[in-house]
Amino acid sequence: MGLSIAVGMLHDQARNDPEGLVYHRRAFDRLGAALGAEGIDWQEPPLDGPAQDPAFSGGFPYRHLTRLRRVLALIGRGEPVTPAEEDGPGWERDCELIQDEASMFASHLICHADNAGYYVPVDFADPLFLPADADVAGAGMVGSTQRLLRELATVAPALGISPAEQGAAPTPAGPFEPEQYAWHQLHRACLASLAGGHAIVFH
């Protein structure tokens, strides 16, 4: 199993999944209402004109996301970024480091559910924690697309990703391949989110 990511997903559902369309429209309505209660004016763009392909659709294994979060946590602590050793003695310590960073409630990459939830194209400083009664997927944790994009820019040099490569498809490159793959998927999702005003949906 792994994480699926979509941007502009209603267009695909309007064509292929009527029940899913109803479900996610309601979910977006709840999200928009909950954000409005926090003073954030955003709604998922409506379906106008003919159905079209999603602006972005992709995904990767959950472990890729953990490894990418690990890189940001190491950078935040001023520690060297070394290849992850998931079976090594330091992996448990690295996971604890990620949890420590999550407890700071500052990182949009780290403070987000692994398998559900949203990033919206609004620039706000800290991740949002919406109340349980708002019934927003991902335990109510919502990130900013703009802030996620900035955090991706922060980790790019440590992964060997240059500005010229940021719009290109990833190519296998040694021990950081999982992190690079997750990085490119999230980067493409951010660009699509900003271009169309859509939420990034983890599902």
Image: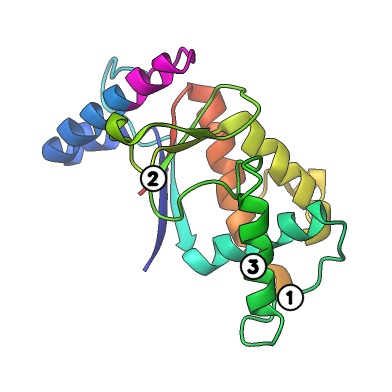
Is residue 173 part of the magenta span, yes or no?
no
Image point (19%, 33%), residue name: 21
Could you tell me how far apart the alpha carbons at marks 2 and 3 are, in whole angstroms? 21 Å
- Neighbourhood count class around disc 3 (C-alpha, 10 Å): few under 14, some 14–19, many 20 upward: few
In magenta, the rendered stretch is: 31-44
Q: Which residue is mark 2?
A: 138
Residue 96 circle label: 3
Question: In the rendered view, would you say 6 is above or below 100?
Answer: above
Q: Is residue 36 left or right of residue 66?
A: left
Is residue 34 part of the magenta span, yes or no?
yes
Question: In the rendered view, would you say 187 is above or below 3?
Answer: above
Q: Is residue 168 left or right of residue 2?
A: right
Image point (44%, 16%), residue name: 42
Q: Decide if residue 171 is in sight here.
A: no
Give yes or no for contact between labels 3 and 1 (Cβ–Cβ under 8 Å): no
Disc nearest the viewer among 2 and 3? 3
* Quadrant of image for the N terminus: bottom left
Q: Which residue is mark 1?
A: 174
Count of marks overlaid on the render: 3
Colour scheme: rainbow
